[in-house]
């Protein structure tokens, strides 16, 4: 009897997660209420979301970690292959892994999972950082270690700022791409996701490798 009850509970949790992920992907995080999730999941008890997840924010955090765990496997596999081949040979190889929007990179992610993550990045990137604990961030930290090694000798504060700025630019690109998928007119004619991604990678490499200006040195 207890096993049957436990199984029903897990099934309910999964239905709530699937419903929430679908709604968040379609409408965004702020436009979806707990009541919307309850209705979409076919739950009669209005308190079922709070019962299983404590809060809407805790539910979002679990959805993020679920997808991050899948993405982490593929990303670590790519870092392993790069290192086994003697790389990275240049920064672009590392940035290509960090900013991979291909279907292969999302292998195993639910159909609405990438759109959900895009929504998180676009409007609540702080939730991404809060939800992804150290075990789900090993590939990113490996990539950043490679980037630091290939950067010129700079003060620690400048290195930290440049990496942070590079991440913010990458997030802005992903958010822009997500918006353009819904409204293509937001991107200029002739732009493609891959061309923009390659241009971004080139620009980030310039940001990370560029010399320190005399003006910046005066502010240190």
Image (cartoon, helix red, strand yellow):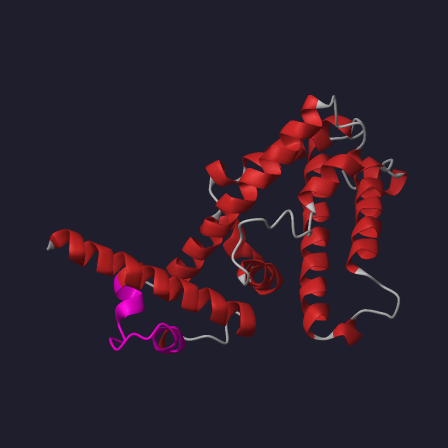
Q: What range of the chain is rendered magenta?
A: 36-51
Asked if residue 127 is among those painted magenta in the image, a careful observer would answer no
Q: Using the image as rendered, state which of residue 132 and residue 103 is in the foreground.
A: 103
Q: Quadrant of the N terminus?
A: bottom left
Give the answer, above or below, for where 179 lies relative to 108: below
Question: Which x, y percent locates residue 218?
Answer: 83, 39
Question: In which image quadrant can residue 188 be found?
Answer: bottom right
Instruction: Please count the marks in the image.
Output: 0
Q: Using the image as rendered, state which of residue 172 and residue 45 is in the foreground.
A: 45
- Looking at the image, the residue that sits furthest to the left is 1
Residue at position x 71%, y 63% from top? 177
Question: In which image quadrant can residue 149 be found?
Answer: top right
Residue at position x 87%, y 35% from top? 211
Residue at position x 65%, y 52% from top? 103
Question: In which image quadrant can residue 124 be found?
Answer: bottom right
Give the answer, above or below, for where 23 lies relative to 209: below
Q: Using the image as rendered, state which of residue 81 and residue 30 is in the foreground.
A: 81
Using residue 119 as the reference point, say whether residue 184 is left or right of it.
right
Question: Which x, y percent locates residue 92?
Answer: 79, 38
Q: Quadrant of the C terminus?
A: top right
Question: Which x, y percent locates residue 79?
Answer: 65, 32
Residue at position x 33%, y 75% from top? 42
Using residue 80 as the reference point, say whether residue 11 is left or right of it.
left
The answer to whether residue 54 is seen in the rendering is no
Give the answer, above or below, for where 106 lies relative to 25: above
Asked if residue 37 is among those painted magenta in the image, a careful observer would answer yes
The answer to whether residue 103 is seen in the rendering is yes
Question: Which x, y percent locates residue 183?
Answer: 72, 75
């Amino acid at each position: 009897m207890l096993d049957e009850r436990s199984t029903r509970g897990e099934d309910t949790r999964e239905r709530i997660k699937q419903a929430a992920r679908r709604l968040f992907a379609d409408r965004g995080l702020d436009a979806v209420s707990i009541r919307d999730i309850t209705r979409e999941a076919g739950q009669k008890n209005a308190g079922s979301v709070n019962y299983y997840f404590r809060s809407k924010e805790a539910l979002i955090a679990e959805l993020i970690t679920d997808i991050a765990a899948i993405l982490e496997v593929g990303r670590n596999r790519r870092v392993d292959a790069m290192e086994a081949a003697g790389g990275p040979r240049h920064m672009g190889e590392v940035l290509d892994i960090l900013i991979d929007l291909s279907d292969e990179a999302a292998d195993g992610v639910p159909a609405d999972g990438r759109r959900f993550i895009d929504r998180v990045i676009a409007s609540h990137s702080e939730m991404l950082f809060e939800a992804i604990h150290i075990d789900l961030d090993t590939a990113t930290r490996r990539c950043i270690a490679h980037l630091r090694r290939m950067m010129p000798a700079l003060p620690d504060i400048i290195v930290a700022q440049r990496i942070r700025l590079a991440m913010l630019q990458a997030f802005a690109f992903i958010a822009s791409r997500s918006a353009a998928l819904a409204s293509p007119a937001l991107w200029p004619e002739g732009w493609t996701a891959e061309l923009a991604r390659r241009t971004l990678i080139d620009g980030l490499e310039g940001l990370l490798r560029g010399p320190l200006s005399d003006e910046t040195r005066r502010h240190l």
